[in-house]
Amino acid sequence: MTVAESKRGKLKSVWDTAQKIVAFLSGLIALVAVFAYLEHYVIAYLIYAIYLALAIFIVSLTLVLVPRVIGQRKQETNLRAQTRAEVVRETLAKSPVKVVREGLSIGARDSIATGLRKLTIPLNKTPTIGWVRCFTQLPVIYLSLHEANVVNASIETKCSEDSVLRTVDAISDLVDRTNQDYDKFLKEEEKRRHEEDIRRTEEARRLAELEKAARRQP
């Protein structure tokens, strides 16, 4: 929904509410006037009827319009929050994968290699399947780095207590290298899709020309 459509919807909603209030007040005033006429108190009680109409009008505004306006403001606030969240998600989706050092955690000792502890290094987002494939296929070997696996939005590995910093640095370097390889992969995929589209367009044009030429034959 566009901003203009949203404004038109709000104006129509307020206008419909105002129409209902006017109709209600008109009917009430007519009823009071008829009653006063029948009782021969038209002049004496006319001012009270006006006061009553004004009081009802104010109460109607309070009970109908105010909650509606509050509801509309809440809806606008929620819409703005959703828009901001969508912008954040889109920005995060376009940003490269990064190591979040502030959130790393050192776990318990390994049950087999007791000199090692489980190290969980969080990432700023959950990588795609293609990114994970590039990470596992990196032609880079760190002799001091144990097997590292991508698990959701983190990388899990093992290390000794005195090699935590070196391990985090190594993982960070692997993540940067993976980003470079994944970017190349995406560009190659885009180029491949573009070439495939060109090939299909050319093939469709060639077939159309063959069909056209065949129809000309007597």
Image (spheres, grey):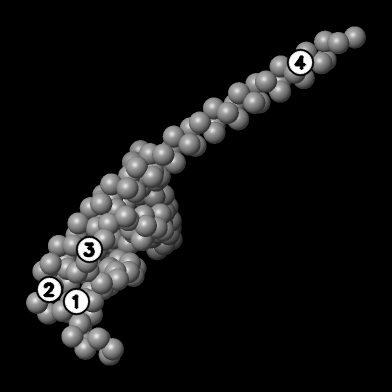
- Label located before the other in sequence (1 or 4): 1
Q: Earlier in the sequence, mark 1 or mark 3?
A: 3
Question: Does 12 sit above or below residue 74?
Answer: above
Q: Which of 6 and 79 is in front in this view?
A: 79
- Marks 4 and 3 close (CB-CB < 8 Å): no
Q: Nearer the viewer, residue 217 or 79?
A: 217
Q: What residue type is labelled 1?
A: Cys
> Mark 1, mark 3: which one is toward the viewer?
3
Query: Does residue 159 show up?
Result: yes
Residue 80 appears in the rendering? no
Please give the name of the residue rendered at 78% of the width and 13% of the height, measured from the top-left corner.
213
Res 7 quadrant in image: top left
Kindly identify which numbered label has been placed on residue 159.
1
Instruction: Assess whether mark 2 and mark 3 are in contact (beta carbons under 8 angstroms).
Output: no
Task: Kindly identify which residue carries mark 2.
Answer: 163
Tell me the CA gap for discs 4 and 3: 63 Å
Image quadrant in which you'd find residue 37: bottom left
Specify which label sits upstream in the sequence, 4 or 3.
3
The crowd level at tag 4 (other Cα within 10 Å; few <14, some 14-19, many 20+) is few
Query: What amino acid is labelled 2 in the image?
Result: Ser
Q: What residue type is labelled 4?
A: Lys
